[in-house]
Image (tube, rainbow, N blue to C red):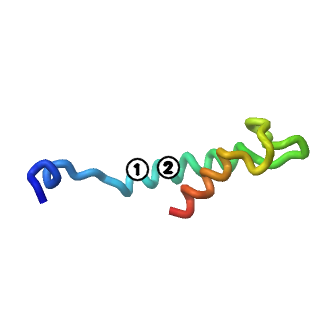
Amino acid sequence: MTSATAGSRHNWESDLERYRIKAVHVLDTHLPATTGCTECGDPWPCARACTAELVLEL
């Protein structure tokens, strides 16, 4: 390890937890409806909901 790498530790767990919290919020608001997503109106499943599910799989 170089000194630049050793000195710059990043807390990936806190980043992942923040992403998980945001993903849950997205899945709480982007819901299926007969006309598409209730939040953005895109066809269901919308890209935001798909991305949120992917984040929760990490």
Total marks shown come to 2
List the single residue furthest toward the top: 40
Residue in view at x 60 percent, y 51 percent: 52
Query: Which residue in the protein does label 2 denote?
Result: 19
Circle 2 sits in a helix, a strand or a loop, which is it? helix
For this view, does 21 lie left or right of residue 38? left
Circle 1 sits in a helix, a strand or a loop, which is it? helix
Image disc number at residue 50: none
Residue in view at x 74 percent, y 36 percent: 40
Image spot of residue 48 (x, y percent): 65, 45
List the single residue furthest toward the right: 34
Type of amino acid under label 2: Tyr
Image spot of residue 6 (x, y percent): 14, 55
Pointer 1 local density, CA inside 10 Å: few below 14, some 14–19, many at least 20: few
Image spot of residue 26 (x, y percent): 64, 45
Query: Which residue in the protein does label 1 denote?
Result: 15
Residue in view at x 13 percent, y 60 percent: 1
Image spot of residue 32 (x, y percent): 81, 49
Pointer 2 local density, CA inside 10 Å: few below 14, some 14–19, many at least 20: some
List the single residue furthest toward the left: 3
Type of amino acid under label 1: Asp
For this view, does 34 lie left or right of residue 25? right
Q: Give the distance between the C-alpha atoms of the residues marked 1 and 2, in whole angstroms.
A: 6 Å
- Pointer 1 and pointer 2: residues touching (CB < 8 Å)? yes
Residue in view at x 22 percent, y 52 percent: 9
Q: Is residue 41 above or below residue 57?
A: above
